[in-house]
Image: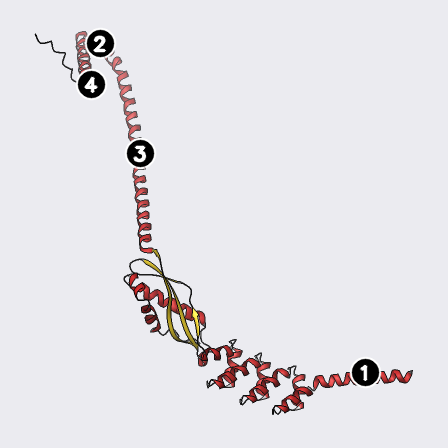
Amino acid sequence: MIALIGSVFILLVFIVGISIFLHFVPLALWISALAAGVNVGIITLIGMRLRRVPPSQIVMPLIKANKAGLDVNVNQLEAHYLAGGNVDRVIDALIAAHRAQIPLPFERSAAIDLAGRNVLEAVQMSVNPKVIETPFVSAVAKNGIELKVKARVTVRANIDRLVGGAGEATILARVGEGVVTTVGSTDDHKEVLANPDHISRTVLTKGLDSGTAFEILSIDIADVDVGRNIGAELMTDQAEAEKRIAQAKAEERRAMAVAREQEMRAYTQEMQAKVVEAQADVPHALAAALREGRMGVMDYYNMNNVLADTQMRETIAKAGPMEPGPKSDEKK
């Protein structure tokens, strides 16, 4: 019984030891590399394990590169992996560039990958140009008509400017700016509708791909729609603003006139009050003049006659001319 337990323990220790050995020494991967003609030593594979580098992510891309005839070594691939790069994508990009006869050294490809760009997509775009479609760009011609323009930009990746070059957003912004400038310098929107290729020719000559990671091959106008009459709307808004200003000034003048009227009414009421007050003093003055002998009774009667005559004349004047009486019937 004790011998059986000892045998089982020795077997378990052997199995664990074999598992640990095969973990640090990937024999299958080493045999695959030898079969592919790639010289990778066992010590190198063990060193990858100790540096926490998956050997399969180094050896398999190395085999792929060796079969494609590329001159790369283990140290380059391991250094790129430790720097945070995608080794498999870099090797695929190098193979694609080699097949398309595009000069792309490993150092540049690794730099592009570490810069955050998809180097394989860039190589594919160099072989097969990409079409970027802009959103509708709103531009206004000189006659005030709005045009909505959509363009398709065919670009090819520029491998030499992928590191430090501007991306697709810059291309779209520059094309939109060129469309706005071209349409804005046109006297009549009908000219743009008749010759939309004038926009593409003008924009293409501006060198919009300068400082970008792309080379613009062509700019094609996909759609041109007529929008609002911006000029008429601006004139309407200006007329409405002037109308409101005139109304405000008229309201100000009316308020001043009302205030002036109220002021004159108050002044008139004040003067009328003074006249009434003065008229109330007239009988007292007449009585005093009669008592003191400065005025006789006949003078008082004459004054009343004059006042009565004046009042009668005013009444007649207000009544207007008298209508003539009816004529007598003519004799038969």
Q: Which quadrant of the figure contains the N terminus?
A: bottom right
**Secondary element at image label 3:** helix
Query: For residue 313, which numbered disc appears in the image?
Result: none
Query: For residue 12, which numbered disc appears in the image?
Result: 1
Marks 1 and 4, how far apart at CA: 141 Å
Query: For residue 258, which numbered disc appears in the image?
Result: 3
Callout in the foreground (3, 1): 1
Residue visible at 40% across and 71% down in the picture: 153
Residue type indicated by callout 3: Val
Residue visible at 68% across and 87% down in the picture: 28
Residue visible at 24% across and 10% down in the picture: 287
Callout in the foreground (4, 2): 4
Residue type indicated by callout 2: Leu
Residue 222: x percent and y percent?
38, 67
Callout in the foreground (2, 1): 1
Q: Quadrant of residue 31?
A: bottom right
Callout in the foreground (1, 4): 1
56, 250: nearer the viewer = 56
Query: For residue 290, which numbered disc appears in the image?
Result: 2
User: Can the viewer see residue 204 in this picture?
Assistant: yes
Residue visible at 48% across and 80% down in the picture: 123
Residue of label 4: 318
Residue type indicated by callout 4: Lys
Q: Are marks 1 and 4 in contact (CB under 8 Å)?
A: no
